[in-house]
Each structure stands twice: as C-alpha cells, then as structure tokens.
Image (cartoon, rainbow, N blue to C red):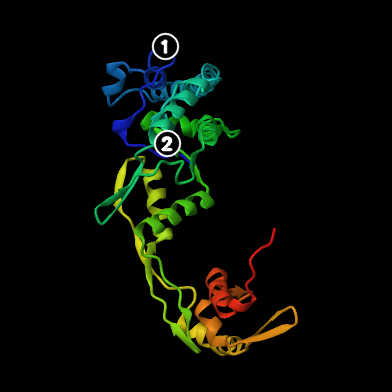
Amino acid sequence: MAQSYPPDNLSTVATDGMPDPLARVRYWIESTLHRARTTVLPELDGEHASHPDAAPGAWQLTGARLGRRLLAAVVLLALLLSTALVVFRVVYTDRVYPAVVVGDVPVGGLTVAAAQDRLAERATSMEQGTIAFAHEGYTWTPSLTNLGVSIDLDTSLIAAQELGRGDNATSRLGFLSDILEDDQVVPLRSTVDQQVLNAWFDRVDREIDRLPVDASIEIDGMMVTVVPGSTGLVVDREAATRQILGALSSLEPVTVTLPLREANPDITAKHLLQVTPDVEQMIRKPVVATFEDREWTIEPATVTPYLTVEIADRGGRLTPTLSVDTDGLARALREMFAEVNRKPVD
C-alpha cells in the first residue's frame, strides 16, 4: 500500500528526452486555472463596478453573462482535465508513473526493464552488511542468503506499476493529486525461509557453546545415579527475527546486540527419576555365556562398567536403553575366559 514519502527524497527521474513531467503537469494546471478564472470573472468596467446607482438591468445582464461563462468554464475545465489524464496515461503506458519510489529506490518515469535493473542493483547491495549481530566481542555478519532472505523484486515492481492505474477514475485523479504533493512509496518486499534462518541460528548456538545439558543416568558398579542437567544460553529467535525484519524495512545497515535467552534442558532429573527403577532392574540380570558344551554366568558387576544409559523420547514417554562398550567388554571377557582362547590354524 502506498504511503507518503519525505519531500527531500522526491523523485526527479524524467522520461528520456522529456523535461520533468511533474513540472509540465503543474504548469498546465496553473495555466488552465488562470484561464478558467479570467473566463468566469472578467474584469468589470470600472464605472459599473463602483457606481452605487448603476441600473438594475445592467447587473442582471452581468449576472446572466457570468452564469453562462461559469458553465462554459466548468465544461471546459472538465474536458481539459479528461484530456490531460488520457495523455498522461498514454505517455506512461510502458513506464512507471512519476514520483514513485520502491523502498528507497526512485523508479518514477522509468521503463519496466530499467526499473527492474535498478531494483536488482539495490538488492545486490543489500546482500552483505544489512545486519550484524554482536555478542561479547564477537560479531556475526551474515549475508541475506545465510538468513534465508530473498528480495521479491517482481512483486515490488508490479505494485509500483499498478499505482494510479486502477479502474476507478476518482482514484486515478486522486493519485495524480498525490504525486503533485509528494513521492509515493511502495515497500521493497522480501521473504524469509524459516528453515534456512533456523539453521543459521543453530550454528550460532553452537558457536556460543553454552547449550543446555540434559540430565543423565550414571552406573557405578550396581549403583544407579541421576546426574542433574544444566540450563544454557541460546539465541532468542523471535527477537532476532524481529531485528532482521526491522533492518529490511529500514533499508539501513545496522549492528545490533545478539538477543539471547536462557534455555532449559529437554530432559531433567525429575524426568529420569521416573525411569531409574527400570535401569536398576535391567542391570541386575546376570548374563549367561555359552561356548560349545560349556556355560558361564557373568555377574552384572562385571558388565556394568561398560554400560551407558541412553534416554529416548518415544511419543512423549521417556524410555531408557543400555548401550554397551563392546570393545572394552570384549577385552575383559578375553581375560576372564582365557581357557577358551585358541590360536588360528592354517
């Protein structure tokens, strides 16, 4: 939607080989109003205008003549105005209307192709340096591509082309009045790929290196212990996204403080206390090993030093699983059952 643009940024782009079109329109309107005024209000004879005893008939004649001239002036003005609007539209058939700005790029009076080239140049200049984030002496300077931002040149240019070209004659006339007063601005539109942006946030979270730590379960012999987790510090993604959108809207390079928030671990000690009995039951079961016709019972205390508890979230329900250090356990078992070791025979 168009909005008023500051007067000091008034577009002065003119069509090739033509003087400033706004100046021509202003001159034409002023001259037309002057003609209409002199037609409707001709200078009266000084004697009739000042004599208090002038004949009533003379004033009636002057009034009738004034009425006819007023009607003729109105018709003439309407005709001239309609003709001017038609000429104006014909002159700018394949051009953006004057005094139109996209973002901070004047495109008024340009052909569609020229306006597109100018917007493409502006988009290229915005790729680097639009926004920088600072935190504890470190600065991130992502490109717009890194942030998943794309400048929508086509949509922006179409919006500029459509200004003043509505089907309603009143709106077209109102637009003409608006551009005589000030530049008309349409935003330089952009889109954000949230998936790409989140990937960049993930990378920054890792570089800050203060991610939250989930609670865990440790096994020491036959003892099962819950180790509490800890909170961390990560990018406040909603606040950072607002800063990015603000920089795109202002079209001015900015350096801002990277917004951070405290992040809680996904798995807390309270969660793990619910599954600790399951882990204790799992490690109490002895392991039976067989070889040929022999059988050995391996006590849990022999296996537990090589066990790690992993917690999986399955549909909102935490489920513990045991992960085995197979290399370490294999070395221990080889020493324990040395009598079954046999050298290979070719």
The circle drawn on residue 185 is 2
Q: Position of residue 72 (x, y in %)?
A: 50, 20
Residue 295 appears left or right of 331: right
Quarter assignment of residue 261: bottom left
Query: Measuring 36% from the left and 41% from the top, which residue is drawn there?
Result: 130
Residue 317 in view in this figure: no
Quarter assignment of residue 61: top left
Kindly give the residue lying farthest to the front in the view shown. Answer: 346
Kindly give the residue lying farthest to the left in the view shown. Answer: 137
Residue 162 in view in this figure: yes
Residue 253 appears left or right of 18: left
Q: Nearer the viewer, residue 269 or 176?
A: 269
Query: Measuring 43% from the left and 59% from the top, which residue is drawn there?
Result: 237
Q: Nearer the viewer, residue 324 or 69?
A: 324
Q: Which residue carries the number 1 mark? A: 18
**SS category of the residue bearing label 1:** loop
Tell me: residue 261, above or below residue 186.
Answer: below
**What kind of residue is marked 2?**
Val
Spatial CA distance of label 1 from label 2 is: 23 Å
Quarter assignment of residue 66: top left
Query: Measuring 32% from the left and 23% from the top, which residue is drawn there?
Result: 54
Tell me: residue 29, above or below residue 136.
Answer: above
**SS category of the residue bearing label 2:** strand
Residue 40 appears left or right of 346: left
